[in-house]
Image: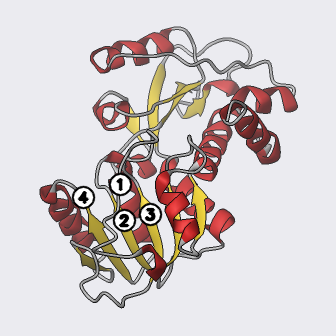
Amino acid sequence: MHNAAFAALGLNWRYAACEVDPKNLRAAIAGAHAMGFAGLNLTVPHKVLALDMVDALDASAKVWGAVNTIRFEGRSPRSNWLPLREFTAEPPAEIRSVGFNTDADGLANSLREDLQLELRGKKVLLLGAGGAGRTAALKLAAENVAELFLVNRTFSKIRDLGGEIGRNFPGVCVVLDYPQDRTTKLDLVLNATSLGLKPDDPLPLDERQFPLSQARAVYDMIYRPAETPLLRAARAAGCQTANGLGMLLHQGARAFELWTGQPAPLAVMRRALEENIYKHT
């Protein structure tokens, strides 16, 4: 999607994918720094590790506790920090790495666009409390959901996450389990686990605890396959459904804008994602 966007805007930029072992992440960031990269994207398991490996953190990375985007900045003659794109004559003498998080806003934008769902006042069941789940939970709380039900294989993770939400967003009612009233209707079930990546994966949700027919909409952060077993079951139960392609698009669009300073061509980027991710399915 990034290379398609660069081409659409006539930018002489190139986005490349590199596999990096976690033990080499610090060296990889330093290498990109040395080679004059405009920035980086990070995916699991690097997002939390990078918090301690960049020179500065944007407010978004501090709030959501993860870094998925890095922008390299140079110190100008006036001693303020500017994106490297601003240095057209000669490279700056001093460069720093700044960590951002574009995942949280990417999720909220996708929910609004793909499910027409405004989160304020809604009741949400979140499955998973790993890196993606934690970011999602904090973003849902920041968007002022009324009730947030947290379910995770390891209870200690949702206990800690629930405490964090309680301290920072006291107006949100957090329940560390499925709804106990089996007649409860929810506005959204959101899967932030990896269950669904493989066709024989079990559902991330226990329908004995909460039947999908009680949910208005189901969102799965997984985008390949396009329809996970959870989304297939949700569609059969009459729910609105969406996968994580919209989140991938919007987090990438925000990263594009941080690096280039130009509005992201969303239609071009979405088309590139759909063609490349689903061309063999």
Q: Is residue 16 visible?
A: yes
- Is the Cβ of the residue at disc 3 closer than 8 Å to that at disc 1? no
The one nearer the camera, 231 or 265, is 231
Mark 4 or mark 2: whose residue is earlier in sequence: 2
The one nearer the camera, 1 or 212, is 212
Observer-side mark, 1 or 4, equals: 4
Type of amino acid under label 3: Leu
- Is the Cβ of the residue at disc 2 closer than 8 Å to that at disc 3? yes
Mark 1 or mark 4: whose residue is earlier in sequence: 1
Mark 4 or mark 3: whose residue is earlier in sequence: 4
Type of amino acid under label 4: Asn
Tell me if residue 154 comes above or below residue 11 in the rendering: below
Q: Quadrant of the N terminus?
A: top right
Q: CA distance from mark 1 to mark 4?
A: 9 Å
- Is the Cβ of the residue at disc 1 closer than 8 Å to that at disc 4? yes
Q: CA distance from mark 2 to mark 3?
A: 5 Å
Type of amino acid under label 2: Leu
Q: Find residue 190 and name its label.
A: 3
Disc 4 is placed on an element classified as loop
